[in-house]
Structure formats: structure tokens, C-alpha cells
Image (tube, rainbow, N blue to C red):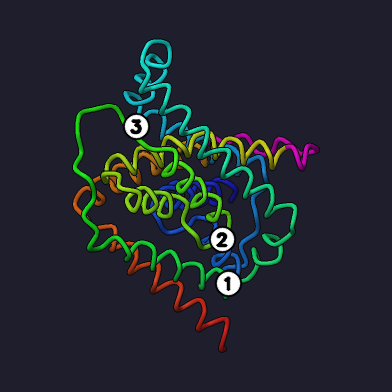
Amino acid sequence: MPSISAFILGLVQGLTEFLPVSSSGHLVIASKLLEYQSPGLILETVVHIATTLAVIIYFRKRFASVIVGVFNDIDSRKLVLMLGLSFCTTAVIGIGLDQSGVIDLVFDSPVFVGAMLLVTAGALFSVLRLQPAAESDQPLQISWKVAVLVGLAQGVAIFPGISRSGFTIVAGLWGGMGRRSAAEFSFLLSVPTILAASLFELWREPDLAIGDGQAMIVAGVVAFITGMAAIHWLMRWLQRGRLWWFAGYCALIGSASVAYWGFF
């Protein structure tokens, strides 16, 4: 039944898009275990737009303050410039990897995905004892060096098994940002990144059928709701210093994937 498949797609994508467990890695593993077939680029794009909308609504006050502040506040202008710097850094890496063909070679390998999940686990574990900077009521501040670091981290996350949210938040924390600030910058950056990636995929395959309208609505609504929940949970757990919970999960799934497909 298309609606059931669309529901599952929206549920999985909404949760794993923002929780630091790698949505692309989970899709590769699921495709091998369950003989999962891609529902089509249009439906996947709808789900990505829904999760992007979840970010915009959840951080609506931050987005509103940045948009208004661009016209009269130097801190807001600097933040937009740093977001642009991170985005451009990611774009250079992403386009370079896409042109090299490396991504196509590894995207169907559950062993590679398992190894990358272990890398994600290591990155998340690395901040277990790290003392993040104190938060303040001042506008979100980030240096150009940290912006480049976050952009690099997001660029590497094009590999399945590397969590985009996990790597960018960890990069921000190691760059001296507070937990909330690192997460907010990561989510702000996710909006242009997800939209650009979706448009790029559509540009590469322009001759697409519209697909099942009911399935698109179901997948979009479910992805939006679960995406909002995932952001809320991550922000709460991050504030409490519990990012390592996800590290344990990634280590378990990554080890199981490498062991199952690598040795059996």
C-alpha cells in the first residue's frame, strides 16, 4: 500500500534527518536488509522540504531575528556571511566528490556505511568530556575559522553513515561554541543545504513523473511532525550533555553492519 510505504519513509526520514545517526546510512542498511526500493526522487524531495519546514518553524524566532537584523544589525549580517561561508565550503566538497564518482561507489556498500557509522560514533564520543562555552543572551556568534570547520564537517557528511547534524554540531563544539549555539548554527545551515541538495538532484534528473499525490501528502506530514519531535529531543538531550547516547547507538549499528556484511 503506497500510503504505508510513504508513512514509513516520512517517519524514518523525519527522525534520522536531525538525530545524529545518519539518515542516508540507515537507508542503505534498510535497503539491504529489507530489499527496500527508492520511492522516487519527487517523493524524497517532498520529505526533505517537509523536514526543512520543521527547522524553519522550530527556530522561527531565530530566523525572524536574522532576517530583520540583516537590514540594521551588524551581528545578523555577520551570521548570514558565516552561514554563506559554511555553505560554500560544503558545496565545493560536495561537488568535488560528486564529480569524482566516489559517492556512487560507496553508496551501496553496507560495510562502508558501518565503518562510517563508527566514525560518527567516535566524533560524538569525542565531546563527552569537552566543556562547551557558556551560553549567553547575545546574538549567535561564530568566527570564520569555525564556519569553515563546520562547512568541512558538513561536506564530509555526504558519505552515507556520516551524520550531518552530528558532525556539524561536534565541529561547532570543538570550535569553542556552546551546545545550543552549535546546534542552532547546524540547523540554520541545514535549510539552504537540504534545499540545494534536493534542487541539485532534481536538476540532474529533470524528466520525473509527479507521482502519487496521497503518498506525498502522507510522507510530508509525517516527516514534518517527526522532524519537529526529533529537533526538540536533540536540543534537550544536547543541553543535558547526552550526545553520547547516539554515539553508543551508532557504534552498535555500525559494528553489526561491518560484522554481518564483512565477515558472513
Image location (x, y in percent) of residue 232: 29, 42
Q: CA distance from mark 2 to mark 3?
A: 26 Å
Q: Is residue 44 above or below residue 128?
A: above
Q: CA distance from mark 1 to mark 2?
A: 8 Å
Frontmost of labels 2 and 3 is 2
Of residues 30 and 132, which is closer to you in this image?
Answer: 132
Magenta stretch, residue numbers: 203-218
Of residues 253 and 67, which is closer to you in this image?
Answer: 67
Mark 1: few/some/many CA within 10 Å (<14, 14-19, 20+):
many
Looking at the image, residue 236 sits to the left or right of residue 70; the answer is: left
Residue at 46%, 48% (x, y): give it.
Answer: 149
Q: Which mark is residue 58?
A: 3
Q: Is residue 74 above or below residue 137?
A: above
Q: Amino acid at mark 2?
A: Pro
- Among the two numbered marks 3 and 1 on one chain, the one whose residue lies closer to the N terminus: 3
- Report the number of numbered marks: 3
Mark 3 and mark 2 in contact (Cβ < 8 Å)? Answer: no
Mark 2: few/some/many CA within 10 Å (<14, 14-19, 20+):
many
Q: Amino acid at mark 3?
A: Tyr
Mark 2 and mark 1 in contact (Cβ < 8 Å)? Answer: yes
Image location (x, y in percent) of residue 239: 21, 47
Image location (x, y in percent) of residue 189: 46, 37
Residue highlighted by disc 2: 160
Q: Which mark is residue 112?
A: 1
